[in-house]
Amino acid sequence: MAPPVPGPGRWRRFADSLLFRMILFGLFLVVVGSTARILVLKEFVREHVEALAAADQMSIASYIARDIDLKISVRQGMLERLARELPRNLLGRPRDLQTWLADRQKFDHPFSNGLLVIPPDGASLIAEYPEVPGRKQLRFDDQDWFKDIGNRAGPVIVKSLRSRITGHPLLTMAAHVIDDNGKQLAVLVGITELLAADLLGPIQDSRFGESGGFLVISPADKLFIVASDPAMTLTAMPQPGINLLHDRVMAGFRGTGTTVNAKGIEELSAIAAVPSTGWVVVARMPMQESLGVVDKVQRFILQGGLITAAIFIVIVGIYLRRVLRPLRDTAGQMRRMADGSMTLQRLPIVRHDEVGAMIAGFNRLADRLNEKEVALKERGLALEQALADLHENQARMTHMAHHDALTDLPNRALFEDRLRQAMARAERHGKQVALLFLDLDGFKPVNDNYGHEIGDTVLREVAERLRETVRRADTVARLGGDEFVIVLADLDEPRPTAQAVAEKCMEAIAPAFLVGDKRLTLGFSIGIALFPEDGEGVATLLARADHAMYRAKQGGRGRHEFFRAAP
């Protein structure tokens, strides 16, 4: 009979099932639908989000521009008013003029670095407040902003530069001091820390979003006035052609647009004007961050698709499992019958459809096979019982051939075999063997006075006590009558070990034997022979142990003796 062909594995069966194919097709539809939604909505959402982000950035840029314009306008108006109010007669009295400046500066004046009065030629300094060390020694006629005063029709100019003394960014504003005839008498200068908290300091400390920021640009000076990146403050703008949006700003563009910054990152920028200075405020943010909501929408659609797929798998899986359960159960039962894990039997017909017709045909086949199987089983049972009885008898006979029938200890044949094995191991591993020959003292009167039945009970108790005395690796055997032997194998120092075991045997036999109402006391005479010291053959070693035992009996019984060769 040919061996059964193994069927496909569990996962292969599932992959070939209708359930798996229908679920796979449904997942395909879900994936296609989600992908189509992502592709269609991506550009639509991107356009609308970009427009919203641009409007939001323009609103913020315009607010900051208005705030800066207000701060500059307040300072312009205040400086123009001070230029009109400055007493002309104090221009020749620097100390009194300094006192007048101090009085004006004390009342929460917005010029944090003070007020200066400079003569029209700019060669010196008439008065200042507060006094800054080294400032009186400066000349102003070589400064571009001072030279530019004569070219301005208006009374006030604005210029950003770094202090020649401290190096800090400054905002310098100047107004003409003129007499009634329009002659220029002096120049009143107000200086403010550019990055003061009440001016442009918040711009440098602010970020737009997570990685965006702000710029304040002076197109006339081609200069970055201040930026969220401190390293850009009062630095020159890029050359034309490097940043196209900056080029458009320099040409007068105000609004929103996209550009690529010096780091190669695409940015969305909004540009608003500061009318009082001619500056512009730029709010910029990386496009990736501005359009982050697009990625969120894509992730949302993807997550929705995954959730839909999971729900589809659960619902369709449950429904199809119910629909296909009769077919699946039938196939499983037929498979178990084929591999023998289930007996051949009729299967229930759940529905009267194609599956039901298939089960009915199988049931007819099963009935015929069962009839044949019953006949074969009846013959097989008889044969199995006969084989079981034969094995049991063989095992019993094997045990009886090697064990004493009374005590169930190894008999002489098994004892000799184990002694021979112990001697062989000792020769291989450089060990020694001790053989103890034990003869009961006082056992004959027990048999004579109380009968063999009590004597047999005593012998069984003696065997049990000896078993408990030695190691499991040692052999206790009964040679016959009241003679026992013990094989101690794999010994390094045989004499002390054999002597200790002999003494334990004496101690084990010492307690009285209680048989019914009788109290019997016995002893041992023990002879000991050692291998290879006292002989190399089984018979030789046994004879010399027996000889040593007789010497122990002659010496008074209840003792042990080692074999000693005749002198």
Image (cartoon, helix red, strand yellow):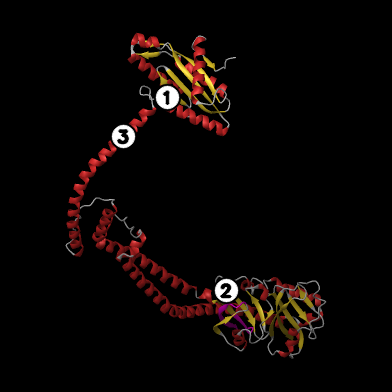
Using the rendered view, name the quadrant where residue 324 is placed: bottom left
Q: Is residue 463 visible?
A: yes
Up/down of 499 relative to 323, above or below: above
Q: Quadrant of the C terminus?
A: top right
Residue at mark 3: 392
Is residue 379 rendered magenta in the image? no
Q: Do the residues labelled 1 and 2 touch (CB within 8 Å)?
A: no
Residue 37 shown left or right of residue 540 in the figure = left
> Residue at position x 39%, y 73% from top?
34
Q: Give the residue at mark 1.
A: 412
Tag nearer the camera, 3 or 1 = 1
Assess disc 1: are there few (<14), some (14-19) or many (≥20) residues with their C-alpha within 10 Å of its C-alpha: some
Q: What stretch is highlighted in magenta?
A: 263-281
Judge left or right: residue 329 versus residue 488. left
The amino acid type of the residue labelled 3 equals Glu
Q: In this view, does 28 lie above or below 240?
A: above
Question: How many angstroms separate mark 2 from mark 3 (CA)?
Answer: 92 Å
- Circle nearer the N terminus (2, 3): 2
Q: Tag 2: residue type?
A: Gly
Residue at 39% in and 28% down: 402
Number of numbered discs overlaid on the protein picture? 3
Of tags 1 and 2, the one toward the viewer is 1
Say whether residue 469 is visible. no
Viewer-proximal residue among 425 and 537: 537
Query: Where is mark 2, residue-wise?
Result: 212
Assess whether residue 279 is covered by the magenta stretch: yes
Crowd rating for badge 2 (residues with CA inside 10 Å; few <14, some 14–19, many 20+):
some
Q: Observer-nearest residue: 472 or 487?
A: 487
The vertical placement of 508 against 271, above or below, is: above
